[in-house]
Amino acid sequence: MQRVVLLLVAVIALSIVAESAQAHDPDQDILEIPEVRVIAEKPVAASSQQFIPDKEIVLQPQGRPAQILRLIPGMLAVEHSGGAGKADQYFLRGFDADHGTDVALFADGMPINLRTHAHGQGYADLNFIIPETIEGLDVNKGAYLPEYGDFATAGAVNFKSRQVVQEGIAQATGGQFDTQRYLLMFSPTKEKVRTLFAAEGFYTNGPYEHDNRYFRGNLFGKLTTNLSSRDELSVTGTFQSSKWNASGEIPLRAVDAGTLGRFGAIDPSEGGNTLRSTIRMNYHYDTLSGGQFFANAYGQYYRLDLFTNFTYFLNDPVNGDGIQQADRRVMYGGDIGYKQQGEVLGMPSIGTIGFQTRVDDIHLRLGTQTTRTPTGTTVDNDVLSASYAPYVKAEVQPLSWMRLTGGLRGETFTFDVHNRCPACAEQADGRKSSGIILPKINLILGPWVGTEFFVNYGEGFHSNDARSAVTPGSSPLARSKSYEVGVRSRPWGPEGVELIATAWLLDLQSELVFVGDEGTTEIRGRSRRQGLEGAMRGQVWGPIYVNGSVTWTKAEFRNGDAIPLAPELTAYGALLVRWPEGLTSQLQATYLGVRPLIEDRSVKSPAWVEVDLTERYQLPIALSHGRLEAFFFIRNLLDTKWEQAIFAFESRLRNEAAGVSDIHFVPGNPRMFMGGVAWYF
């Protein structure tokens, strides 16, 4: 394995040297030709790698940006606390990734996951994304690509934003539970300078007995231009502000006894507010010799105030167990690199060398609260977390039916934690550095009759919370090893249905996890996840399209214990029909199977299916400028009673003498109707 990786690294140096050695006459006339856009599928390194286009995104029910992640085979995102204001809970490849610990999420290459977050490591809130601004999703499962690092154990997803829209859009949506959404998006310029602006306002009270009063406001702006005939520069800025109430996770015993409604709350003061502003720059320059220089930079300001109460009156029978978590941070970083195409020993090759860096400057606080009034401090830290990651990547095609890709990634972290609360017992304070080297290798065979075969190996990692990383004897970086074999086929031609089958295995080493809700650390042992994925997507016949997937996973600690909350069977299916006269219909279903809630498998969550219906119709109304489109969607068409987030732990109600181990859950939304009108101008 090491020899193969070293060979791929050597290709990078050879390809760059070979191209540089080519004679070039600086006085030679250069003929400038107009840009010609060629649309084709991007070559992939693994059967599980794919690009999900915007035409599938716009057919998802509106309100939750994370909802579009279910288009990824085997991935689900559910609301976590009876209120949609905070980050969702993510499931992928046998991981209950909580709010993002083992799924890396990006926006145009800018990291979304937040290290050493007040509520959980890798916290990834997608609510600053306006779905209509997204051109597509780049999906990379496993850890097979050197350009992805922290949190990319189960996989990485990059939200790629548009440069322009050919038609502006003004849209108004309304529905049950006082839900409203308004969208304005347009491109004032579309040629040499390309601009895109969007604004979104969203409000809902939800189905809960205590109104969510969830408000979200988003602004988006992007400018793209060409400073010369060979480069491109994009600058993107976003701003998000949200606030909400939450009903929290409720105990099953109270619902079964009839003392609490399914959409009720033990502590209706839960909720929070958040703000996020970002700016990112993406630049690349194409050389005359087939090379490309690229440089990207980003910066974020973020804040969150979160009020929760998981155990009710277990620890404090008088005032309750309310928790306040506060996060204030500035995060900045970027990457720079060079990519060269050419031939090495007669083999078409691409070599890439790059360097990424990131800094999180954070102030964290954890304390007790009663009805959002602070009553004490448990944790108060200043944290400076930085990482530096050089990487090399090579892509070689020794035969017409064989490709090799891979490389090496190195990552160095520094953690600096300062305790601001001398009265807080046994809190982290100190400095530590840690590093890791990650090899990657991928073999692609084919295509033969529209079929390709893939063999993949890669090592990834997720960083642990800095407050646990500086603890003596800790392991700051948890290494993962991913293995995968798969096949992709289009047996009925390039325009027909694509079939995908993948078998994979992922080992994760022992790690030290910070439990943000308690301000403590918990040691977890080695684990193994393995599974099978099957997917199909494409045009079946005429106006009929399908998109579906089934994923089976076995997730265990190496001692045989179950990994709590890890999904075992998930499925997604969609049937889309593009009718004549401008009508588009989509019926889709999401399934999450039974899951163990504790290690001995004695308590399990029930399975559920949610079915959604979407209809969009271009109205035959003559306008002097633009066109109209009406749409509606029904979430949970069958009105299934289902649970989104679900946990097993001990809690205590006010009338109970002691704590009780029980299932606690967030109810899934009942049947919900929303509809609206969009004016395209």
Image (tube, rainbow, N blue to C red):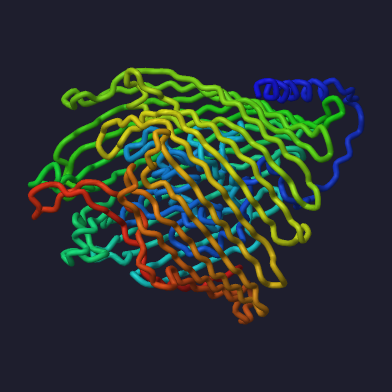
* Residue 114 location (% of width, % of height): 42, 37
- Occupied quadrant, residue 356: top right
- Occupied quadrant, residue 615: bottom right
Task: Give the residue displayed 40% in from the left and 67% down from the top.
Answer: 180
Placement of 468 over or under 30, stated as above or below:
above
Q: Answer whether residue 131 is visible to the viewer in this image.
A: yes
Q: Nearer the viewer, residue 69 or 27?
A: 69
Q: Relative to 137, is 413 on the left or the right?
A: left
Q: Nearer the viewer, residue 493 or 506?
A: 506
Placement of 668 over or under 649, stated as above or below:
below
Placement of 525 over or under 269, stated as above or below:
above
Placement of 129 over or under 670, stated as above or below:
above
* Residue 513 location (% of width, % of height): 35, 32
Q: Relative to 617, is 255 on the left or the right?
A: left
Count of residue discs? 0
Q: Nearer the viewer, residue 593 or 342?
A: 593
Q: Relative to 165, is 330 on the left or the right?
A: left
Q: Which residue reaches farthest bottom? A: 621
Identify the image quadrant of the N terminus.
top right
Task: Give the residue displayed 69% in from the left and 50% down from the top.
Answer: 488
* Residue 538 location (% of width, % of height): 67, 61
Q: Nearer the viewer, residue 477 or 308?
A: 477
Q: Relative to 489, is 435 on the left or the right?
A: left
Task: Give the residue displayed 37% in from the left and 35% down from the top.
Answer: 329
